[in-house]
Image (cartoon, coloured by chain):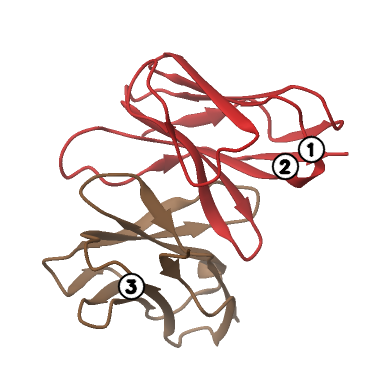
Chain colours: A brown, B red
């Protein structure tokens, strides 16, 4: 039973344009949401997060949006750079318990 | 910076062998986790530990066991390796206090069982 879904396995965008990665979750009790970035042959690294009491969090080129009514999370990268090419995982958590991850979206930013 | 290290980057084992994957973190984190990553399935939780000598099953514990004798070290054990355990294994750690959600990952061990 997948509690976290990333329905797009891959995304390709041009350098300088916006990248939008999406994530849907099933349980309205989740209260903390994170995005991780993973390069080949490396472990995932934390990128940005948002708590359920907010609907937007911004950190430089990265913005995470949370739509609780739709149980939808998105990550916007503006402007996209070739170095952003990686696999992006969304993750959800409830009450400081263990985390659940989506299947990942492979982003390719073309020069 | 938090550092999580895993004993091997690449490992090749034969079916039926006992396999030990070691993970060490240097930030005095209470919580430690083992995941496996497979294409199309993302990261799936195998086992986790909230503290020394404590362990909890994750979503896919079958065929695995763990050991946490010291706070900094969390070992994943494949009692009798099988080909369907060929995967990327990732260890993570996290501080146990309210508001600390971020997990820090090691570089991963790519295990091939032949």
Residue B62 sits above or below residue B55 on the image: below
Counting from the top left corner in percent of width and height, residue B3 is at 44, 31
Q: Are marks 1 and 3 on the same chain?
A: no
The residue shown at (29%, 66%) is A27
Task: Kindly tell me whether residue A7 is visible in this rendering.
Answer: yes
Q: CA distance from mark 2 to mark 1?
A: 6 Å
The residue shown at (81%, 43%) is B83
Quarter of the rendering containing residue A4: bottom left
In the picture, the quarter occupied by the C terminus of chain A is bottom right
Relative horizontal placement of residue B71, taking residue A102 as reference (left or right): left
Q: CA distance from mark 2 to mark 3?
A: 38 Å
Dot 2, crowdedness within 10 Å: few (<14), some or many (≥20)?
Answer: some
Which of the two residues, A45 or A17, is positioned nearer the viewer here?
Answer: A45
Q: Please identify the residue farthest to the left as the structure is shown.
A: A53
Residue A20 sits above or below residue B15 on the image: below
Residue position marked by numbered label 3 in the rendering? A61
Local secondary structure at mark 1: loop
Counting from the top left corner in percent of width and height, residue B44 is at 53, 50
Q: CA distance from mark 1 to mark 3?
A: 43 Å
Dot 1, crowdedness within 10 Å: few (<14), some or many (≥20)?
Answer: some
Local secondary structure at mark 2: helix
The residue shown at (13%, 69%) is A54
Judging from the image, mark 2 belongs to the subunit labelled B
Q: Which mark is residue B85?
A: 2
The residue shown at (54%, 80%) is A8
Q: Which mark is residue A18?
A: none
Residue position marked by numbered label 1 in the rendering? B82
Counting from the top left corner in percent of width and height, residue B106 is at 52, 37
Contact flag, marks 1 and 3 (Cβ < 8 Å) = no
Relative horizontal placement of residue B114, taking residue A89 as reference (left or right): right
Tag in front: 2 or 3: 2
């Amino acid at each position: 039973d997948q509690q976290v879904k990333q329905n797009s396995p891959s995304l390709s965008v041009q350098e300088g344009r916006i990248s939008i990665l999406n994530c849907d979750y099933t349980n309205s009790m989740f209260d903390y949401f994170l995005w991780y970035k993973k390069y080949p042959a490396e472990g995932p690294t934390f990128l940005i997060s948002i708590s359920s009491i907010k609907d937007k969090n911004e950190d430089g080129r990265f913005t995470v949006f949370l739509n609780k009514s739709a149980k939808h999370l998105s990550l916007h990268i503006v402007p996209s750079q070739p170095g952003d090419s990686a696999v992006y995982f969304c993750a959800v958590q409830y009450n400081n318990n263990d985390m659940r991850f989506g299947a990942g979206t492979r982003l390719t930013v073309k020069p | 910076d938090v550092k999580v290290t895993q004993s091997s980057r690449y490992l090749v084992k034969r079916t039926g062998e006992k396999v030990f994957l070691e993970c060490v973190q240097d930030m005095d984190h209470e919580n430690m986790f083992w995941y496996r990553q497979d294409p199309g399935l993302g990261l799936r939780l195998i086992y986790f530990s909230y503290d020394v000598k404590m362990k909890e099953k994750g979503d896919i514990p079958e065929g695995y066991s763990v050991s946490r004798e010291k706070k900094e070290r969390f070992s994943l054990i494949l009692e009798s390796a099988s080909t369907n355990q060929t995967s990327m294994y990732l260890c993570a750690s996290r501080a146990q206090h309210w508001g600390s959600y971020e997990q820090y990952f090691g570089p991963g061990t790519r295990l091939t069982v032949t």
